Image: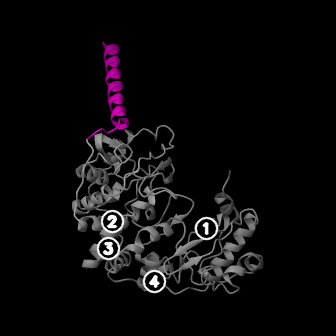
Amino acid sequence: MIKRLLSGLIVIIAIVIAVLWWRENRTWDGPVQKVTASAEQIEQGKYLTRAADCAACHTAPGGAPMAGGVPLETPFGTIFGSNITPSADQGIGRWTKEQFYTALTEGVAPGGRHLYPAMPYTSYKGLTREDSDAIYAYLMTRPAVDVAAPENEMPFPFNQRMAMMGWNLLFRTSDPLPSASQGASEQWTRGRYLVDVLGHCGECHTPRGKLGQMDLDRPLQGGVLGRFSAPAITPDALAQRGWTPNDVQTFLSTGIAPQGSAFSEMHTVVDLSTRHLNADDQKALVTYLMGDNAPQAVALKAVANSDNEAGRMTWLNVCAGCHAREGEGKPNVSVSMVNNATLRQPDGRNLIVSVLDGLPAQSFPGNQSMQSMPSFASNLSDEEIAGLANYLRTTWGGQPGNITPEQVKALRQHE
């Protein structure tokens, strides 16, 4: 009797798994949607699509707009941004606006296929239906591109989408994300929607647990997803690194501020999203990040610079030519080291990775630019980079010179 019960149970489990696998892997074959929308709704959708930074994940370098293919590196493998053009077979051309809204806010595509939270439905859950419909109208009136996104590169068991049902039971709620600042004004409320929902800033700037879930007890307190860390952007953290509301707004609208220039993923965010926001929304975004009563920017504190002659000589030999001897930088060449926000981060990860990997040349609004920074991984030893980092942190960052060669070694790219 027990053997027959066990055999029956195994059969039932096998059938359930087979049905779930089919559900997650079948191609949705609903009717092709014909969408008509007003010019006003399409224009609003274009604005919201930029505010939601859709192009960052769905437009590959050199690829067609919104045709997918952007690789998103995660601890669980590489996920490629999907095609969200109106292509019937490769994009969202068969999705209704109701299905589109469900995918954005619940992470479930037509037919029951679960999306990975690399598509930030854990933040988009707060999206209004009106805004979702406008984004849908805009996307569905763009040119269709019949290009398939690459297959995700994820090992077992992470490549089994059915596992997302359990992940969602554990971590997806309909509750709004906890606020990272204090406020009650109309601007603060609008800014919270822009930051926590449309801009989904917490997806990078909030720490994550072992299963990839956002640590909602520490909203916007910094996170690491790739080579660079996304620093804490709470009011106190921003103030501690010398940011004022005016400087934050300048940075988000141009990518350059007295505290430095946007680089890595943040340059993409500014270029594709925040610089396109209107002045009212930019101000609202800053109001939420800094709070209705923004804290005063903390003045740079002098730190006793031990006899770090080796770090100073490395600076003079390999850095001062671009950044200037006294660290003041050069317009359209390099950023200033004085009061630089990267140097003022308690964690030296971004500084170390910048020295190891270098940075590409980058353009900014107003015909401004920054020249490329070469990689020094093959030119400088772990000890030399640690000494340089400590010289920079103590001289211009107000931070202790506590970077070790072991930290540098751990961040080197190993082929």
**Residue at the disc numbered 2:** 46
Residue 70: where, in percent of width, then height? 49, 54
Amino acid type, label 1: Pro
Q: Are marks 1 and 4 in contact (CB under 8 Å)?
A: no
- State which tag comes first along the sequence, 4 or 2: 2
Mark in the foreground, 1 or 3? 1
Q: How is the image coloured?
A: one colour
* Drawn side of residue 396 relative to residue 52, left or right: right
**Residue at the disc numbered 4:** 247
* Drawn side of residue 7 relative to residue 296, left or right: left
Residue 114: where, in percent of width, then height? 35, 44
Amino acid type, label 4: Asp
Write the start and end of the magenta stretch as one range.
1-30
Residue 133: where, in percent of width, then height? 24, 59
The dot on residue 191 is 3
Location of the N terminus (image quadrant)? top left
Please tell me whether residue 17 belongs to the stretch shown in magenta: yes
Please tell me whether residue 5 belongs to the stretch shown in magenta: yes
Q: Tell me the residue at 28%/57% (across/down).
A: 136
